[in-house]
Image (tube, rainbow, N blue to C red):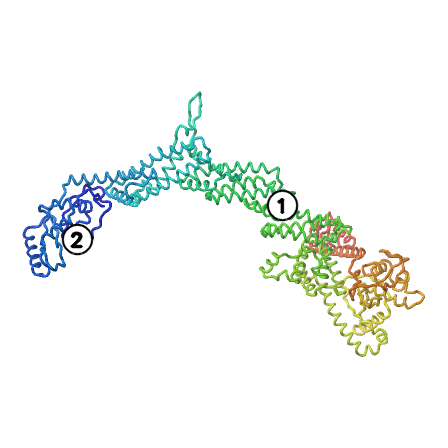
């Protein structure tokens, strides 16, 4: 209904509407009946006054002339249509029956009048009035204004009654649509502000008098959690009531409040009123009063983060108590209540003002108690687990109960400060971290790294990490009792640390660099040289022997813990490398790991000497597991140390190739004229000789050991010597039998066996052929007889006999039995020897290095190092001419550190030797180079 515009007075009386072209029946059928129209008003008031938009402006009166003309024309049309019958021209409602029509059903009266005036006819298709004229139907202005005001008053009363019913949780007496229309009419009439004020006042009164009273009555003497539950239940009821209120007054929201910025929307107003009731309302119990100066009362100073109402403070305390129950895993904890309470405070917009400061304060007290309780009683592992669990629980709680992101950030920041930053000494304790690393506790180290990473302190973990690596590694390289296991133990340590970096530190390169620095320090530590009787570091030697073991025996010589796991294989495939599931790829990876240890060595000359020696054994005895692996390792060393380091090693491979070519030519020569002219060849046709011609400069030096070869072999050696000197004039062959080996066929009682033996072993075994043929000896040879026949003596003879008679494969029998060989022992062939294999290796003794050979290698390394040191001194002085002692020592160390760490005392001794050789002289406390 639109009676007037806002601000206007009562609407003026509307003129009568024009006649309807379709008659009364058609007009009545198309008119929409207003359900909110007052039934007590007359028809004229409802049709024209309350809805002037539907009425059209018409002239106030019509002259009689116009009416007569109109009536004449209408009558002529009706008379001309015979089939229509007679009907009344005009229905006059101003006659005696107009009063009845005005007060009753006008359409019904009109139809009755027209039906009475029309005569009966057989065919009347258009029976009905053609025109309805209402003359001078007006309501007096005072009465109309009174009716309008009465309608508005009744509408206001209906709205107040509806609000009371809503507050009482009862359905309103008046339909909601009529209430909505009433709000619309009041707003259109200009009473929007008054309507808003009445709504605000009535809601405020209900909250303060009814709701707050009920809350106080129900929460008297109960806990804070129960108070929170009661308030939340009242809030849920208020939300339902607010929904009905907003639906009734939605037109006020959309038409008036949306443009009125000084007044809040209805929803905001209802929320604000409930919030003020809870957090701002005060009574006698809510006033904090303290007595000062003999009884003068003074209120507590206001705190912006603390609500002024006691009810609000109890609500916040109840929420904090719920959080504490959750932290203590109390079974009475109500998770739904806490979640709903947090949402309620978010709606009230007091979460950040009141709850967040109190929650953070209580949480800090809880964390401090947590730390004090575990700081002294728990070890590092337990403390890490407790801290990790606490942080996870607090994070889950903040996410599960809709805590604000700022609350979560501040809470975690305070937890990190209390648990980690302020307790850094406990978390970074070197001994405690070392215990975790010794136990390979990846989970605890990962948790520790994650904890320290939160405040950005994870880089401080590098100090205890490096300390552990250096201390553990130094204990390994100085353990002389387990020297043979040194490299395997170092690789196991490296493997453990790599797994720790991969799984615990997330492949952080910062810790990888720290581990490498620690390895470099303990491998080149001065205590390493002092721990060994050689006076030099054994690390280089042991790495060379480890690589020799890999290249001879392959992966089967390694413990399973050193091999790659599934994650290593996956990483290798992702990086485009060959999968470590392949044996060749795994062997290459193990060689790389050994080379990693080699990179840390400053003195690589020891490694070079022993690697060359072991390589010579593998090449000459054919014991390499893979020639591709040998070539691959050589290329790795060349890449790492340069071509000068691998020059001699490459020459050794070239010598092997040249020797094979030379032997092929020798065999061709034997098949030709050479074999026909040779008497020795006819005597030893059963011996197949293979000779390796080596360059003396590239290969290791071997001591000359006298050996009387069997006649069959000696003839072949002489024949090759003759051939070689004929082809290569001016060359001299020096025969070295130390690394020579033979394949000997032996007949035992259980059958024939092939024995792979060294040259020394073959010479001894061949003696027993003559001993068995000699009836006097009866197949028995003494220690002295064997020595005289083979020219072997001392340790070489003892080791060889021991390998044949006292080892795992005993083809000889020693009398008396025992593990050691004496000069009074005698030996016979063990004809009862048996073995499941047809070809048996007995020459393992050749692969083992004696103490004398080891000491000789170190002596050669020391001598070479002295020559290199003197050469470096001469080069430096030649370029600088004059230098002080300290400067010269520093430069010598700098230039020779790639070949090994030099002691300043050794440098001084070499300086003295150069002074004796007239390369240098002293002058005014300095060294001067002599040209």
Q: Is residue 877 visible?
A: no
Q: Position of residue 836 (x, y in %)?
A: 78, 64
Against 323, is 680 above or below?
Answer: below
- Residue 759 occupies which quadrant of the picture? bottom right
- Decide which of 112, 243 is in the foreground and name it: 112
Estimate how packed mark 2 is, as few (under 14), some (14 to 19) or many (20 or more) residues with alpha carbons within 10 Å.
some
Q: Nearer the viewer, mark 2 or mark 1?
A: 2
Is 650 on the left or on the right of 283, as rendered? Answer: right
Q: Classify the position of the C terminus by image quarter.
A: bottom right
Mark 2 to mark 1 CA distance (whole Å): 103 Å
Kindly check if marks 2 and 1 are in contact, taking CB atoms under 8 A apart as contact.
no
User: Residue 341: image x %, image y %?
Assistant: 44, 40
The image shows residue 438, relative to residue 667, as above or below, that is above
Label number found at residue 463: 1
Which residue carries the number 2 mark? 25
166, 546: nearer the viewer? 166
Tell me the tag on residue 791: none
- Left or right: residue 37 compared with residue 631: left
**Snapshot quadrant of residue 642:** bottom right
Q: Is residue 920 left or right of residue 269?
A: right
Q: Percent position (x, y) of residue 52? A: 19, 47
Q: Nearer the viewer, residue 130 or 189?
A: 130
Q: Secondary structure at mark 1?
A: helix
Rendered location of residue 503, percent (x, y): 60, 51
Residue in the foreground of this view, choosing between 469 and 231: 231
Q: Residue furthest right?
A: 776
Q: Residue 722's image quarter? A: bottom right
Q: Is residue 575 above or below residue 463?
A: below
Of callouts 2 and 1, the N-terminal one: 2
């Amino acid at each position: 209904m639109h009676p007037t515009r806002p601000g206007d007075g009562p609407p003026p009386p509307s003129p009568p509407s024009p006649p309807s072209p379709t008659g009364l029946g058609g007009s009545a059928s198309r008119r929409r009946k207003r359900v909110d129209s007052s039934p007590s008003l007359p028809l004229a008031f409802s049709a024209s006054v309350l809805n002037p938009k539907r009425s059209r402006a018409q002239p106030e009166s019509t002259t009689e002339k116009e009416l007569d003309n109109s009536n004449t024309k209408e009558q002529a049309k009706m008379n001309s249509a015979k089939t229509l019958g007679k009907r009344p021209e005009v229905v006059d409602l101003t006659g005696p029956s107009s009063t009845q029509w005005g007060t009753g059903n006008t359409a019904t009266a009109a139809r009755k009048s027209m039906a009475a005036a029309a005569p009966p006819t057989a065919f009347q298709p258009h029976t009905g009035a053609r025109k309805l004229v209402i003359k001078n139907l007006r309501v007096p202005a005072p009465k109309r204004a009174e009716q309008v005001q009465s309608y508005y008053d009744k509408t206001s009363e209906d709205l107040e009654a509806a609000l009371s019913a809503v507050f009482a949780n009862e359905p309103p007496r008046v339909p909601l649509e009529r209430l909505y229309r009433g709000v619309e009419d009041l707003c259109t009439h200009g009473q929007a502000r008054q309507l808003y004020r009445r709504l605000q006042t009535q809601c405020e009164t209900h909250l303060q008098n009814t709701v707050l009273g009920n809350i106080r009555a129900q929460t008297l003497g109960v806990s804070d959690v129960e108070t929170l539950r009661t308030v939340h239940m009242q809030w849920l009821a208020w939300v339902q009531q607010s929904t009905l209120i907003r639906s009734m007054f939605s037109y006020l929201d959309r038409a008036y409040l949306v443009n009125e910025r000084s007044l809040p929307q209805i929803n905001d107003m209802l929320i604000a009123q409930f919030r003020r009731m809870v957090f701002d309302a005060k009574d006698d119990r809510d006033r904090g009063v303290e007595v000062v100066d003999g009884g003068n009362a003074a209120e507590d100073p206001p705190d912006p983060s603390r609500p002024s109402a006691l009810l609000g403070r109890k609500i916040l305390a109840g929420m904090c108590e719920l959080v504490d129950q959750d932290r203590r895993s109390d079974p009475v904890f109500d998770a739904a209540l806490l979640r709903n309470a947090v949402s309620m405070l978010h709606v009230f917009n007091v979460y950040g003002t009141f709850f967040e400061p109190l929650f953070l304060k209580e949480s800090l007290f809880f964390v401090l108690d947590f730390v004090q309780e575990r700081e002294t009683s728990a070890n590092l592992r337990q403390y890490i687990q407790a801290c990790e669990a606490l942080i996870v629980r607090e994070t889950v709680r903040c996410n599960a109960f809709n805590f604000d992101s700022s609350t979560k950030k501040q809470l975690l920041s305070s937890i990190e400060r209390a648990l980690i930053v302020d307790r850094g000494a406990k978390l970074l304790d070197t001994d405690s971290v070392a215990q975790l690393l010794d136990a390979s506790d990846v989970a605890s180290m990962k948790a520790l790294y994650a904890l320290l990473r939160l405040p950005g302190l994870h880089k401080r973990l590098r100090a205890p990490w490096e300390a552990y690596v250096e201390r553990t590694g130094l204990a390994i390289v100085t353990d002389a009792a387990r020297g043979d296991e040194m490299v395997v133990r170092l690789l196991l340590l490296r493997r453990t640390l790599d797994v720790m970096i991969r799984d615990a530190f997330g492949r952080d390169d910062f810790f990888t660099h720290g581990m490498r620095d620690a390895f470099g320090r303990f491998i080149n530590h001065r205590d390493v040289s002092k721990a060994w009787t050689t006076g030099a570091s054994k690390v280089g030697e042991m790495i060379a022997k480890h690589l020799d073991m890999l290249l001879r025996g392959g992966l089967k010589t390694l413990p399973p813990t050193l091999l790659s796991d599934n994650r290593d294989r996956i990483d290798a495939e992702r990086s485009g490398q060959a999968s470590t599931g392949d044996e060749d790829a795994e062997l290459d990876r193990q060689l790389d790991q050994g080379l990693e240890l080699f990179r840390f060595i400053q003195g690589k000359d020891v490694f070079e000497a022993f690697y060359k020696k072991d390589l010579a054994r593998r090449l000459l005895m054919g014991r390499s597991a893979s020639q591709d692996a040998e070539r691959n390792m050589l290329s790795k060393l060349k890449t790492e140390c340069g071509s000068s380091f691998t020059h001699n090693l490459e020459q050794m491979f070239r010598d092997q190739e040249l020797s094979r070519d030379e032997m092929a030519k020798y065999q061709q020569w034997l098949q030709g004229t050479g074999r026909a002219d040779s008497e020795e060849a006819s005597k030893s046709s059963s011996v197949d000789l293979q000779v390796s011609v080596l360059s003396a400069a590239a290969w290791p030096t071997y001591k000359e050991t006298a050996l009387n070869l069997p006649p069959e072999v000696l003839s072949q050696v002489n024949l090759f010597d003759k051939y070689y000197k004929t082809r290569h004039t001016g060359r001299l062959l020096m025969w070295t039998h130390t690394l020579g080996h033979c394949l000997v066929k032996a007949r035992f009682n259980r059958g024939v066996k092939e024995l792979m033996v060294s040259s020394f072993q073959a010479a001894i075994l061949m003696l027993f052929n003559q001993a068995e043929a000699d009836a006097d000896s009866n197949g028995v040879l003494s220690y002295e007889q064997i020595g005289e026949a083979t020219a072997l003596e001392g340790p070489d003879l003892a080791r060889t006999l021991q390998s044949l008679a006292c080892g795992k494969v005993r083809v000889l029998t020693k009398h008396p039995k025992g593990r050691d060989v004496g000069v009074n022992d005698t030996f016979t062939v063990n004809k009862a020897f048996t073995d499941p294999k047809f070809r048996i290796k007995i020459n393992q003794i050749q692969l083992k290095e004696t103490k004398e050979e080891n000491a000789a290698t170190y002596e050669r390394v020391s001598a070479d190092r002295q020559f290199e040191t003197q050469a470096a001194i001469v080069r430096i002085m030649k370029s600088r001419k004059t230098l002080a002692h300290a400067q010269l020592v520093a430069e010598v160390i700098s230039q020779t550190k790639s070949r090994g760490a030099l002691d300043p005392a050794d440098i001084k001794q070499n300086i003295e030797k150069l002074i004796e050789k007239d390369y240098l002289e002293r002058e005014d406390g300095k060294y001067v180079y002599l040209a």
